Image: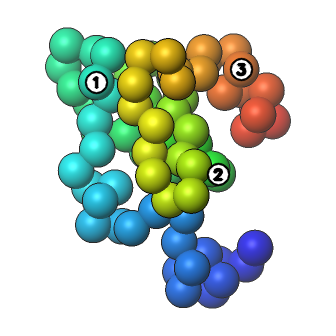
Amino acid sequence: MTATESETNPIIDPAMLDLLANPLHPDRPKLLLKGTLLVCPLTGVGFPIISGIPQLLPESVISKEEVDKILGQ
């Protein structure tokens, strides 16, 4: 997907992205969109986005190690 495609067909509504925070961290840091995941900048854990809906329940969390593998880091 090119930058133009991602701007016209975002994986998640940019206005919603501004509202999302890590529900598992006491400081509630804002989540960052990286690929198809929402990633916590403090802990590195990720949350999937399925059909444009963020999956922020504890059972949906993806470990930092798994996030790194998915993102190729």
Quarter of the image where one finds residue 23: top left
Marked residue nearer the N-terminal end (3 or 2): 2
Instruction: Give the vertical position of 43 relative to 39 (above or below).
Output: above
User: Are circles 3 and 1 on residues that touch, CB within 8 Å?
Assistant: no
> Between marks 1 and 2, how big is the CA–CA gap?
20 Å
Looking at the rendered image, the disc whose residue lies closer to the viewer, 3 or 1, is 1
Neighbours of disc 2 within 10 Å: few (<14), some (14-19), many (20+): few
Q: Position of residue 72 (x, y in %)?
A: 81, 36
Q: Residue at x 51, y 33 (%)?
A: 47
Front residue of this view, candidates 45 and 13: 13
User: Are circles 1 and 2 on residues that touch, CB within 8 Å?
Assistant: no
Quadrant showing the C terminus: top right
Neighbours of disc 3 within 10 Å: few (<14), some (14-19), many (20+): some
The disc label shown at residue 23, or none: 1
Quarter of the image where one finds residue 26: top left
The disc label shown at residue 42, or none: none
Residue type at the position of mark 2? Gly
Instruction: Give the vertical position of 59 relative to 52 (above or below).
Output: above
Q: Name the residue under label 2.
A: 35
Marked residue nearer the N-terminal end (3 or 1): 1
Q: Residue at x 60, y 15 (%)?
A: 63
Residue type at the position of mark 3? Glu
Instruction: Give the vertical position of 3 relative to 48 (above or below).
Output: below
Q: Which residue is drawn at 66% across and 27% down?
A: 67
Marked residue nearer the N-terminal end (1 or 2): 1
Residue at the limit of the structure toward the left, as seen here? 27
Q: Name the residue under label 3.
A: 66
